[in-house]
């Protein structure tokens, strides 16, 4: 009875879910000299057997001689089961399904570009999978309908999806999509690819020991805040003399960093003209929520220390 029940569950599984895995790109195999991301599945004497993550996990092999430019003493130190690696395609035998790969011919720049491309393709793949589940259409069929063509038209489907947030007809107008597919796609794209504001921060040490030092620091900070624009505002907080943090939020990271860099230049020009000094401890950069929490903890700790010192002073007076 138990086996019959299990078989019924299999039979009742929606047909669009059966073998719904799909490669990310139109070509079923990569081309020679392509850089691809793989996951190591098994390490043997001849080399490492891997799965090509962008091509529906088809198998490839990194030969032992292609693992490293250096003499190999221990293959397990070079490559481990479960790890993801960027490799370059050396040979593809489409008839036999053999794919030979190399790790030693990959530069750090190649790794960065490949990982960036993979992350974008993975985002697209996730969106397409969700649309497949919602509309009950096989994922590969959706790719054939429009997505693989978007790679050709826009260079990458993720770039096309981002444009579809503001110009959906320009991106999707040429495809004969049902309202259900179009609405589901745009909803998933909006949920996953709508730009999020990025926090930018710089850490500064600002000091001036002249007669008008306090006024000089105030003037310098105002000069920094004057770099604000209608879209981005510079905010400066005192952590503990002489340490200040300067912050803004921006939709474009580079634009936010450029604005805070300009603000630092404004502060430096004013404070130095008045006999003070500016030390940029940490230049403008994007920060995470963890960085914000650490800053808040630091400020709370310093505030608590100040309170304790004030309490000690009161006790001595008593």
Image: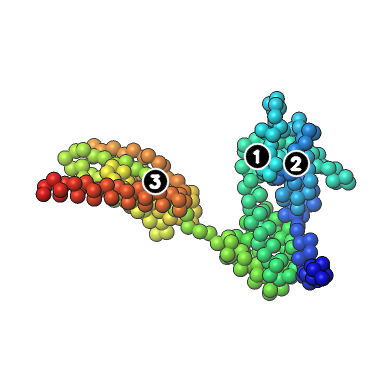
Q: Quadrant of residue 26?
A: bottom right
Label 1 Cα crowd, 10 Å radius (few <14 / some 14-19 / many 20+): some
Q: Is residue 168 above or below residue 202?
A: below
Classify mark 2: helix, strand or loop.
strand
Query: Which residue does the image show at 65% across and 67% down from the upper left?
Result: 185
Disc marking residue 202: 3
- Residue at the farthest top position: 71
Mark 1–mark 2 CB contact (< 8 Å): no
**Residue 37, x across and y down, in percent:** 69, 45
Taking 42 as reference, is 70 above or below it? above
**Residue found at x 80% / y 42%:** 99
Q: How far across and down, in percent of the image, does residue 68 sit?
A: 70, 30
Taking the image as shown, residue 115 lies to the left or right of residue 146, namely: left
Quadrant where the N terminus sits is bottom right
Of the pair 3 and 124, the residue shown nearer to us? 3
The mark that comes first in sequence, 3 or 1, is: 1
The quarter of the displayed image where residue 158 is located: bottom right
Contact (CB < 8 A) between labels 2 and 3? no
| Earlier sequence position, callout 1 versus callout 2 | 2
Farthest residue to the bottom: give it.
179
Residue under label 1: 110
Q: Secondary structure at mark 1?
A: helix
Determine the CA span between mark 1 and mark 2: 24 Å
Q: Mark 3 or mark 2, which is nearer the start of the sequence?
A: 2
Tag of residue 185: none
- Seen in the image, is 162 located left or right of residue 282? right
Q: What is the number of the mark on residue 42?
A: 2
Front: mark 1 or 2: 2
Q: Residues within 10 Å of mark 2 (few under 14, many from 20)?
A: some
């Amino acid at each position: 009875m138990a086996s019959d029940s299990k078989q019924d569950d299999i039979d009742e599984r929606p047909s669009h879910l059966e073998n719904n895995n799909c490669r990310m790109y139109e070509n079923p195999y990569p081309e020679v000299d392509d850089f691809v991301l793989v996951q190591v599945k098994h390490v043997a004497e001849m080399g490492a057997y891997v799965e090509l993550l962008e091509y529906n996990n088809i198998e490839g092999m990194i030969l032992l001689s292609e693992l490293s430019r250096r003499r190999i003493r221990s293959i397990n130190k070079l490559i481990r089961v479960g790890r993801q690696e960027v490799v370059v395609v050396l040979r593809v035998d489409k008839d036999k399904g053999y794919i030979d790969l190399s790790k030693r011919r990959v530069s750090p720049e190649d790794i960065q570009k490949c990982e960036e491309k993979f992350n974008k393709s993975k985002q697209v793949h996730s969106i397409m999978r969700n649309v497949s589940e919602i509309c009950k259409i096989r994922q590969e069929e959706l790719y054939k309908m429009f997505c693989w063509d978007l790679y050709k038209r826009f260079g990458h489907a993720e770039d096309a999806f981002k444009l579809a947030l503001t110009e959906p007809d320009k991106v999707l107008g040429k495809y004969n999509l049902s309202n259900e597919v179009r609405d589901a796609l745009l909803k998933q794209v909006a949920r996953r690819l709508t730009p999020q504001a990025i926090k930018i921060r710089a850490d500064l040490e600002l000091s001036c020991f002249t007669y008008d030092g306090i006024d000089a620091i105030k003037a310098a900070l105002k000069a920094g805040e004057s770099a604000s624009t209608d879209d981005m505002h510079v905010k400066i907080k005192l952590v503990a003399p002489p340490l200040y943090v300067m912050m803004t939020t921006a939709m474009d990271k580079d634009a936010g960093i450029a604005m805070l860099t300009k603000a630092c230049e404004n502060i430096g020009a004013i404070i130095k003209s008045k006999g003070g000094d500016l030390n940029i401890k940490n230049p403008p950069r994007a920060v995470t929520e963890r960085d914000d929490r650490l800053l808040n903890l630091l400020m709370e700790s310093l505030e608590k220390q100040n309170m304790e010192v004030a309490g000690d002073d009161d006790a001595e007076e008593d």
